[in-house]
Image: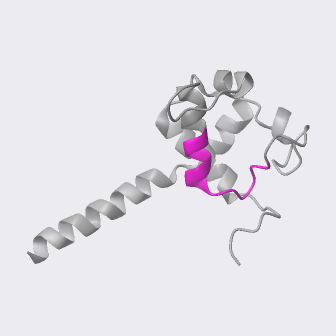
């Protein structure tokens, strides 16, 4: 029983480490796909007030949003022609990396009270 619990614990830890994403790769991908063109150079000042501030946002939320844009209109998807086009070439690992990078940035967002 102890071995089973240990295996589950370490398996969950390794999945969390993988899900966290690679910040350095995320930074390179955010530059490659020019995320700053719409979300601002520091990802805190979007060019349009209806665009979200990305810096400091929760990584899991950011990744899920990208997955939803990739899925497109329909069940559990999001419909935005710009974002849908931007995320199409991204793999799940790429999206996790970008999310990790954006989450690591300083922000004025209130994440905890």
- Left or right of 91 on screen, residue 50: right
Which residue is found at the position 71% from the left and 78% from the top? 113
Q: Is residue 57 magenta?
A: yes
Residue farthest to the left, as pictured: 1
**Is 87 rendered above or below residue 113?**
above
Q: Is residue 25 visible?
A: no
Please provide the residue range marked out in magenta: 53-65
Q: Is residue 44 visible?
A: yes
Which residue is found at the position 62% from the left and 32% from the top? 78
Q: Position of residue 42 (x, y in %)?
A: 84, 49
Q: Determine which quarter of the picture holds residue 98.
A: top right
Which residue is found at the position 81% from the left and 47% from the top? 43
Q: Determine which quarter of the picture holds residue 104.
A: bottom right
Q: Position of residue 26 (x, y in %)?
A: 62, 43
Q: Quadrant of the N terminus?
A: bottom left
Q: Position of residue 30 (x, y in %)?
A: 70, 38
- Left or right of 65 on screen, residue 32: right
């Amino acid at each position: 029983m102890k071995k089973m619990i240990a295996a589950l614990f370490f398996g969950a830890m390794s999945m969390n480490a993988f899900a966290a994403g690679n910040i350095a790769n995320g930074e390179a991908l955010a530059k490659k796909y020019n995320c700053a063109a719409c979300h601002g150079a520091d990802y805190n000042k979007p060019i349009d007030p209806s665009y979200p501030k990305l810096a400091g946002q929760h990584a899991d939320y950011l990744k899920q949003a990208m997955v939803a844009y990739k899925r497109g209109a329909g069940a559990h998807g999001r419909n935005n022609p710009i974002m849908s086009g931007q995320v199409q070439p991204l793999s799940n690992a790429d999206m996790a990396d970008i999310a990790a990078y954006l989450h690591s940035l300083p922000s004025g967002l209130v994440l905890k009270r």
